[in-house]
Image (cartoon, rainbow, N blue to C red):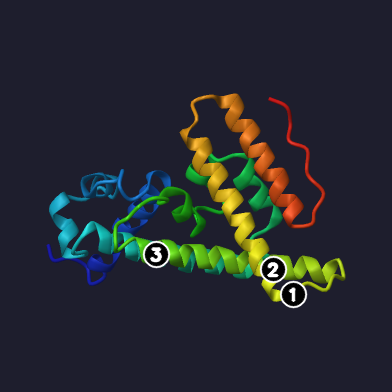
Amino acid sequence: MPYAKDHKTRSRSRILQSAMELFARYGFKKVSISQIMKEARMTHGAFYAHFESKESLYSASFLELLKESGRSRLVKAPLPIKKLIALASNYWNLRQQAEPGPGPETLLFNEVGNDNEKIRPLLQSSYEDLRHLLERRLKALSRLQKLEVSSALIRDRARAILASLVGAVTLARMLPDDEERHELLRVAQTQILAQMQLSPVRVSDH
């Protein structure tokens, strides 16, 4: 029986969806083509009918992630404060979120230290995308608070927030002590909220 006209498109979409989920959860280095194809319920050999390499699939899945994230952020306020707090206070959300799903920020957490020359430009894009979202949020907050804040200060504040967030989550993933992870992320959350000129939110005791 001949394949339907949209068979190739649907097959590629299945591979992309599986890749996005696995890459967001484990990162580029820890995911194999075999794992992706198993997740997509397709044969390993079918992979090369759609992508020339794991790097090309990663790039395509990242671009798809940007598209999906952009659509959801058109509906909601850019980088809601609630989501930022969740990222800082519970790093497992970065790998297991069902709503609203992984965004470009997952690349920053998963690929820190990746020196693959085809991945590093995507890391830069992810960083810039999230930095710009933070800058827009900071500008909106400064207007609400009727503060005169320079663009340079807003850019630096966004950079500082990203450094705090990525650094804290990266370090927390390395620590075996659950209590110290919680404390590290709690302090990072407090610092981030202070940098956004918000009152710190109390984190529940563990």
Q: Is residue 151 above or below residue 119?
A: below
Find residue 106 and report its horizontal and vertical position in percent: 48, 53
Q: CA distance from mark 2 to mark 3?
A: 23 Å
Labels 1 & 2 near each other (Cβ < 8 A): yes
Question: On residue 76, which mark appears?
Answer: none
Determine if residue 166 is in view: yes
Task: Give neighbour class at mark 1: few <14, some 14-19, many 20+ (Cα, 10 Å).
Answer: few
- Disc 1 is placed on an element classified as loop
Q: Is residue 165 above or below residue 202?
A: below
**Residue where numbered disc 3 is placed:** 122
* Residue 1 as seen in the image, left or right of residue 97: left
**Residue where numbered disc 2 is placed:** 154
Question: On residue 150, which mark appears?
Answer: 1
Determine if residue 78 is in view: no
- Disc 3 is placed on an element classified as helix
Task: Give neighbour class at mark 3: few <14, some 14-19, many 20+ (Cα, 10 Å).
Answer: some
Task: Give, as a three-letter code, the residue at label 3.
Answer: Leu
Find residue 184 and report its horizontal and vertical position in percent: 62, 35
Residue under the point 64% across and 62% down: 158
Q: Is residue 142 above or below residue 88?
A: below
Task: Give, as a three-letter code, the residue at label 2.
Answer: Ile
Mark positioned earlier in the residue sequence (1 or 3): 3
Mark positioned earlier in the residue sequence (2 or 3): 3
Find residue 67 and report its horizontal and vertical position in percent: 47, 69
